[in-house]
Image (cartoon, rainbow, N blue to C red):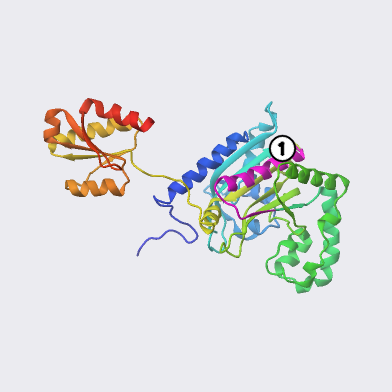
Amino acid sequence: MAMNAPRGTQDILPGTVEKWQYIEETLRDLSHRFHYKEIRTPIFEHTELFQRGVGDSTDIVQKEMYTFEDRGGRSITLRPEGTASVVRSFVQNKLYGLANQPTKLFYFGPMFRYERPQQGRYRQFIQFGMEALGSEDPAVDAEVLSFAMKAYEELGLKSLKLVLNSLGDQVSREAHRQALVDHFSPHKEELCGDCQLRLEQNPLRVLDCKKDKDHPAMETAPSILEYLNEFSETYFDQVKRYLDAMGIDYEVDPNLVRGLDYYNHTAFEIMSEAEGFGAITTLSGGGRYNGLVEDIGGPDTPGIGFALSIERLLMALEAEGVELPAEDALDCYVIAMGEKAELEAVKLVDQLRSNGLQVDKDYLQKKMKAQFKAADRLKAKKVVILGDREIEEGVGNVKDMTSGEQKEVKLEEIVNELKVEKEE
């Protein structure tokens, strides 16, 4: 029986992985400009972390987590998202005690959710995320939003829409919660089973239901913006003023609630409006989560963050016809013909690599013509040809594959010449 990758996973092969690397390098560079530091957390955590951090009423916890018992009888879960793990590390390592606050972190890594695979959605997927912990300044919200938009724009996307909402503070949410219960209760039996449960656990999640989205009660549901108290309304207005000052366009959507329980105040999504992108247009999302650090056992610490899927980013780039400048060309390919030449070629390849050049050679004993074809397929900029005659004369033939020019260079000077040309 043929062995295939598990459903909902993928192999990222050479030729494609270079695009991933370019994206990662771009995001890492942008993170440094915004003064965010990288953090790496375990791929699996204690299940309780996600039950407390993500929320029992979410689809992630109820339906999508990969959870198992280890040999010690402990319940372990492959991380379905990154924020809870980062916050756990923030608490465990007492990063809140560092002199420089807020603590600004970013991460890359695989996440795992058991959901129906579809285009751009996998059971193992790669996320980039960033978290700012320790400040309740609306300017930090605007900074995170600015980063998210710049990340896509610097990679070449243009058909973007930033959608904002405020979920308010605890007081505002309680008032809105009761209004939602009063509104949906007369229609409870008409709602799906999940929404009937959500109405008791977290009514705000009813607004995010895909099954009941066309129910008439959805259109007349009370908006959170009608229940924001003065503090929450002022906070949201300040975030919008900062975005206006930076020239960042946005749209306010009072029905945007996000899928995780820990959000409050600012919530947002970035969507692709590219033609042919697909029915699910969301590229990334995030928001403020004051209270999450405390829920996980730390001190009362505000936080905000967002995460984006690399897979969906690649889909959006393809939809807009954006070609990433991810060049994969050899600096040099060494061709050897003859026993003495082969020995010298192994030595030369090693020296060139030690001097920072990307170099390869033939390992299949091909004829010279076939080796030239290999060099051409690998987009080699230079080819060094060594034969037993050249070795006896102490030279090598260096050919420029762009111009076709060829010249003899002393063996001891080849490394320095190719190094200098690369640096130029």
Q: In the depicted view, which residue is nearer to us: 120 or 380?
A: 380
Task: Tell me residue 95's x, y (percent).
Answer: 66, 32
Could you say where residue 48 lies in the image, as x and y percent from the top left?
Answer: 65, 48
Quadrant occupied by the C terminus: top left
Main SS type for the magenta part? helix
Is residue 34 highlighted in magenta? no
**Which class describes the residues within 10 Å of circle 1: few (<14), some (14-19), or many (20+)?**
some
Q: Which quadrant would residue 207 be assigned to in this image?
A: bottom right
Please provide percent x and percent y for residue 150: 62, 44
Left/right of residue 50 with respect to residue 176 in the rendered view: left
107 is higher (above) or lower (below) than 222:
above
- Element on which disc 1 rests: loop
Residue 225 position (above or below residue 206): above
Quadrant (top left, top right, bottom left, bottom right) of the N terminus: bottom left
Look at mark 1 in the image and give the residue it sits on. 298
Residue name at image x 81 percent, y 46 percent: 237
Report the span colored magenta.
Answer: 135-162
Residue 148 within the magenta-colored segment of the rendering: yes
Q: Amino acid at mark 1?
A: Gly
Percent coordinates x, y for residue 236 in the rendering: 80, 47
Residue 316: image quadrant is bottom right
Front-most of residues 210 and 174: 210
On the question of residue 317 being in view, the answer is yes
